[in-house]
Amino acid sequence: MRADEQRLRRSDAARPGPGIVHLGLGAFFRAFGAIYVEDAVRVSGGDWGIIGVSLQSPSVRDRLAPQDFVYTCVTQDADGGETFRKVEIVQDVLVAPENPEAVLAWMANPAICIVTLTVTEKGYCHDPATGRLNLEHPDIVHDLDNPLPRSAPGFLVRALQRRRDAGLPPFTVLTCDNLPENGRLVRRAVLDLAGRIDPSLADWIATEGRFPATMVDRITPATKPEDIERLAQKTGYRDEAPVMCEPFRQWVVEDDFVEAYGTDARPDLAAAGAEMVQDVTPYENMKLRMLNGTHSSLAYLGYLAGHETIAETVADPVFAGFVKRLWRQEIMPSFAPPEGVDLEAYADALFRRYSNPAIRHRTWQIAMDGSQKLPQRILGTISDNLDAGRPCPGLMLAVAGWMRYVGGIDEKGQPIEVKDPLAAQLRALSEAAQTADLKVASLLGVRDIFSSRLAAELAQPVSRAYEFLSVHGARKAVGDIK
């Protein structure tokens, strides 16, 4: 820290009391959900301070604690401009492995009305192919027999158990992860685990609990050391935990919160710009398929073609044409849009967002955890197209691109650092097979990702795409899609 720099500090404004516990306090929630909550408090008041929880690493707590849990949200415009906002809604951050009892105590506190989550797909310890809780997951095995849990479902169940035993209403479980029917998914995981621990607890949660589904959207690239240095130079203060984001944001929330809290069931999210709806499913399908599906497709194929970021990828005219074709010929026909939404306009807006050079959203970052993301982002669209008799060669190529990527070697023969819960298994399957057909068949046999029915339908088209990709490279393969 330079002598002329000061550490970021909290203002003298009155703090709202805690009303929310958030599991998984990463960059996305701090650039998204926390902003909405703080805006709601500014407009309508209420004690909706956030107690953050890290379920794994202490790194976020260690960066935020010296600056009293205040951080800067940096909004990056396409023209290179930046706006800086100090965010003060987070009141504390706990590290679950260090003190799970403290986490449960806060979640069971009667002041807490909502528990929000951004734990990524793998954090729900579920089987992506079925949506059910994976009872063989090591953390779930632990949580079945231990009152101090490790997993997100475990913390939810044990905290709800404490509230029931204390005669308190449950908290609303509000997931903010990019999963189809995310509210139903977390409800199913919680009830599966609660039913194994105490069937009467599962009955109480099913009756009294609420798990509204949501759709979240804001591109939030990883913060780099140079971002921290640039912020210090521009503001004169030192922030070790800023978050970067695009100007666009959208939060669609099912307005279904625990009734026992009445008008105090939630912050005034609508006043902060959130869309409160009865059914979020049409918005989920639109975003997961049109944004996340193309993001993942561009990530695997763009990475293989040597592109570092999404903006760089779509600046390549071959990839620009590819993603526009995906939207209009393969994705948009696969689902019904939300009422009043123009999908052509939505696609155009997505392309402008992807093209923002200030948002250095790395293809490698988006490519993480593909075994968890593929079923929701791409395979559902493929399945619907196949059922309707619509060809989808671009999405077949995207699956082949994922298969090449998880093989661990890029087109120049260099190793790829594959970050995925199944990384070792996927690479071993790829390396053990000697031909394109055998590699595809082996990977399609992973039932955590592909159902047997879908695997049979994908075998020939994905094998052809994989063969072409292997021989001609990603850029030529993308350009060849008509």
Image (spheres, rainbow, N blue to C red):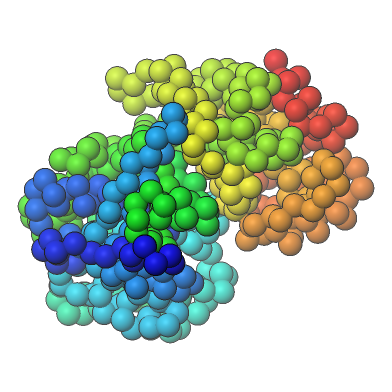
Outermost residue on the right side: it is 434
From the viewer's perspective, is 247 left or right of 210? right
The C terminus - image quarter: top right
Q: Residue at x 73, y 46 (%)?
A: 405
- Tell me the quarter of the picture where residue 379 sits: top right
Q: Nearer the viewer, residue 427 or 322?
A: 322
The N terminus - image quarter: bottom left
Q: Position of residue 259 (x, y in %)?
A: 13, 55
Q: Position of residue 18 (x, y in %)?
A: 18, 67
Q: Nearer the viewer, residue 53 or 308?
A: 308
From the viewer's perspective, is 419 left or right of 426? left
In the image, is residue 473 above or below residue 4?
above
Counting every numbered tag in the picture gives: 0
Q: Position of residue 267 (x, y in %)?
A: 16, 52
Q: Nearer the viewer, residue 234 or 172?
A: 234
Outermost residue on the front side: it is 3
Q: Nearer the viewer, residue 465 or 387?
A: 465
Residue 444 seen in this snapshot = yes
Q: Residue at x 88, y 32 (%)?
A: 471
Q: Residue at x 33, y 65 (%)?
A: 6
- Tell me the quarter of the picture where residue 239 sits: bottom left
Q: Position of residue 410 (x, y in %)?
A: 79, 45
From the viewer's perspective, is 421 left or right of 98? right
In the image, is residue 168 above or below residue 430?
below
Residue 437 seen in this snapshot = no
Q: Residue at x 49, y 39 (%)?
A: 359
